[in-house]
């Protein structure tokens, strides 16, 4: 076993996390991750209401005896959800760790502290990680440019961003973006991380709720098969490079393009249709560059055990064949 501050803090067998993914991080996937000895996060906003989240937490508990967390992503919106109500359900349900992302979670910290909930904030820049530490977050996830979703606007890859964060912070740092195998975990640990967080790798698992054809798409993909969109609006997103994503990127190059010109193509409901039907012509499909490292769809337990074992073997191999003279 690989033991770090993160494994001790959350009672894990492996320094591996499954990040919260909207419409993907539901009970079956999260319970499988937890049962494998890693840390899975339900996606709070996948549920249409706080009470629906309460039921999903109960459903997850019926599938595993191990602890799991909840992701609460705070995004700008004209009609924002009731974040406080979702947070209250998290606390009342006895969840002990929450993954926050997006905007600063400071307004929720007093509630989480009162209920003994540990907070792990996902960041895309060192300055944001420092702010997270300042407001009392227990750990940070540092999202490299390779990641799916919203990797920020600085285009800094994990190889540079991760050690910069480790050198700047005292709380544990969790690596995210470009990780899908044991070599990646070993590399992250050597750069100072105390766990890795993965999304795309867990999407291509047997327990993942996405359509099988999308899992096959991830298997067939290379590291060249993602597309950056919404750069014009400083809301950069990395998605699978399908015809819809290519069209979004094309429209962004047009003079006078506004978000209304691309919003029908990137709507959450259209993305939900893609996940359910597997029809890539219906909308965008989130995927990180790590899709180039995925070649199968095993069970979650097999993924976790394989990555952990590969990392240990890699570390031992390096120790045996590299001799440092004094």
Image (tube, helix red, strand yellow):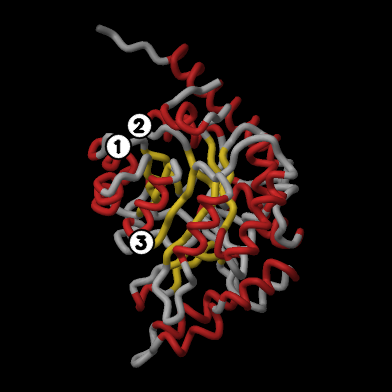
Relative to 27, is 265 on the left or the right?
A: left
Provide the secondary structure element on which disc 3 rests: loop
Residue count near mark 1 (Cα–Cα under 10 Å), binned few <14, some 14–19, many ≥20: many
Could you tell me if residue 213 is visible in this image?
yes
Q: State whether residue 203 is above or below residue 246.
A: above
Task: Find residue 190 and report its horizontal and vertical position in percent.
Answer: 39, 28
In terms of sequence position, does the residue under pointer 2 or pointer 3 come before the other?
Answer: 3
Task: Find residue 154 and report its horizontal and vertical position in percent.
Answer: 29, 60
Give residue 166's mark. Answer: 1
Q: Is residue 190 or residue 107 the one in the foreground?
A: 107
Provide the secondary structure element on which disc 1 rests: helix
Give residue 192's mark. Answer: 2
**Residues under labels 2 and 3: Cα distance?**
21 Å
In terms of sequence position, does the residue under pointer 3 or pointer 1 come before the other?
Answer: 3
In terms of sequence position, does the residue under pointer 2 or pointer 1 come before the other?
Answer: 1
Could you tell me if residue 292 is visible in this image?
no
Relative to 279, is 173 on the left or the right?
A: left
Task: Find residue 136 and report its horizontal and vertical position in percent.
Answer: 30, 45
Residue positioned 43% across, 54% down in the render? 100
**Residues under labels 3 and 1: Cα distance?**
18 Å
Task: Find residue 135 and report its horizontal and vertical position in percent.
Answer: 27, 49
Residue positioned 68% across, 57% down in the render? 55
Residue positioned 54% across, 74% down in the render? 245
Give residue 152's mark. Answer: 3
Q: Is residue 264 or residue 6 the one in the foreground?
A: 6
């Amino acid at each position: 076993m690989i033991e770090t501050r993160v494994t001790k803090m959350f009672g894990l067998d492996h320094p591996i996390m499954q990040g919260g993914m909207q419409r993907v991080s539901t009970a079956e996937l999260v319970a499988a991750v937890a049962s494998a000895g890693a840390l899975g996060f339900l996606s709070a906003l996948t549920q249409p209401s706080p009470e629906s989240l309460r039921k999903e937490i109960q459903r997850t508990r019926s599938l595993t005896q191990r602890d799991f967390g909840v992701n609460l992503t705070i995004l700008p919106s004209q009609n924002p959800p009731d974040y406080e109500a979702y947070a209250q359900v998290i606390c009342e349900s006895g969840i002990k760790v929450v993954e926050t992302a997006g905007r600063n979670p400071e307004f929720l910290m007093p509630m989480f502290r009162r209920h003994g909930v540990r907070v792990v904030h996902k960041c895309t820049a060192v300055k944001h990680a420092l702010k997270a530490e300042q407001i009392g977050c227990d750990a940070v996830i540092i999202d490299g440019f390779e990641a799916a979703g919203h990797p920020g606007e600085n285009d800094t890859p994990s190889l540079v961003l991760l050690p910069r964060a480790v050198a700047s912070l005292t709380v544990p740092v969790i690596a995210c973006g470009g990780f899908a195998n044991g070599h990646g975990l070993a590399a992250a640990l050597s750069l100072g991380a105390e766990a890795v967080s993965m999304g795309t790798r867990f999407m291509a698992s047997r327990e993942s709720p996405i359509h099988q054809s999308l899992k096959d798409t991830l298997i067939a993909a290379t590291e060249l098969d993602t597309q950056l969109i919404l750069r014009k609006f400083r809301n950069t997103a990395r998605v699978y490079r399908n015809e819809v994503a290519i069209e979004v990127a094309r429209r962004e190059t047009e003079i006078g393009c506004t978000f209304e010109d691309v919003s029908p193509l990137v709507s959450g409901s259209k993305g939900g249709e893609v996940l359910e039907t597997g029809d890539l012509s219906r909308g965008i499909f989130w995927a990180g560059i790590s899709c180039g490292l995925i070649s199968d769809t095993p069970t979650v337990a097999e993924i976790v055990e394989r990555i952990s074992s590969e990392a240990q073997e890699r570390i031992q191999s390096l120790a045996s064949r590299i001799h440092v003279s004094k």
